[in-house]
Image: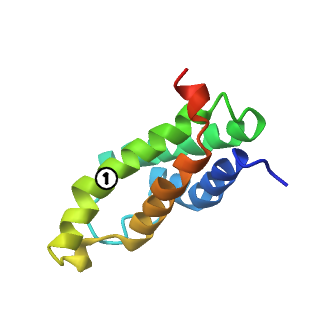
Amino acid sequence: MPEPLQIPYVLNILILIPIALSTLLDLWDTAQGKFDESAGWRVLAGSLWTAILVGSVLGLFAPLVYAPLLLMQVIYKSLWLAVFAIPRLAARRLDEIPWGITVSFVVIVLTYPWVIPWSHLLP
């Protein structure tokens, strides 16, 4: 059974195996048709998500070393929710929200802070 700090890495791997590479290689519309995609957006997001996938695999073996990756995810996903999803939710423009991305981001933002080793990151 994984230790608590390994759980976010496992979750990242499970989420990102189908999403990261399919975004990077343009295999399907990972934005769920909710906002315009471009080759630049796909490569940028796909590269970021693939880097998080690789870091998460490494994090299974060195959880403390890769803990900053978890913090970075909480920060960028919180920003995306605050700037993109929440304003559309408040304006009742629900059809513009990619719910797969949004739900996974909310889960990560609400759970990862409980397992991030804050004493290790903020000495």
Q: Nearer the viewer, residue 54 or 110?
A: 110
Is residue 80 placed above or below 73 in the rendered structure? below
Residue at left 45%, top 66%?
28
Q: Quadrant of the N terminus?
A: bottom right
Residue at left 31%, top 45%?
40
Is residue 101 placed above or below 25 in the rendered structure? below
Which x, y percent locates residue 41? 32, 49
Q: Residues within 10 Å of mark 1 (few under 14, many from 20)?
A: some
Q: Quadrant of the C terminus?
A: top right
Q: Is residue 18 left or right of residue 23?
A: right
Residue at left 39%, top 42%?
75
Which x, y percent locates residue 16? 57, 55
Q: Residue 116, can we see it?
A: yes
Residue indicated by mark 1: 80
**Identity, as a three-letter code, of the amino acid under mark 1:** Trp
Given the current orientation, which residue lies at the most extreme left position? 91
User: Element under label 1?
Assistant: helix
Residue at left 52%, top 53%?
20
Is residue 14 placed above or below 32 in the rendered structure? above
Q: Is residue 33 left or right of residue 20?
A: left
Residue 97 in which image quadrant:
bottom left
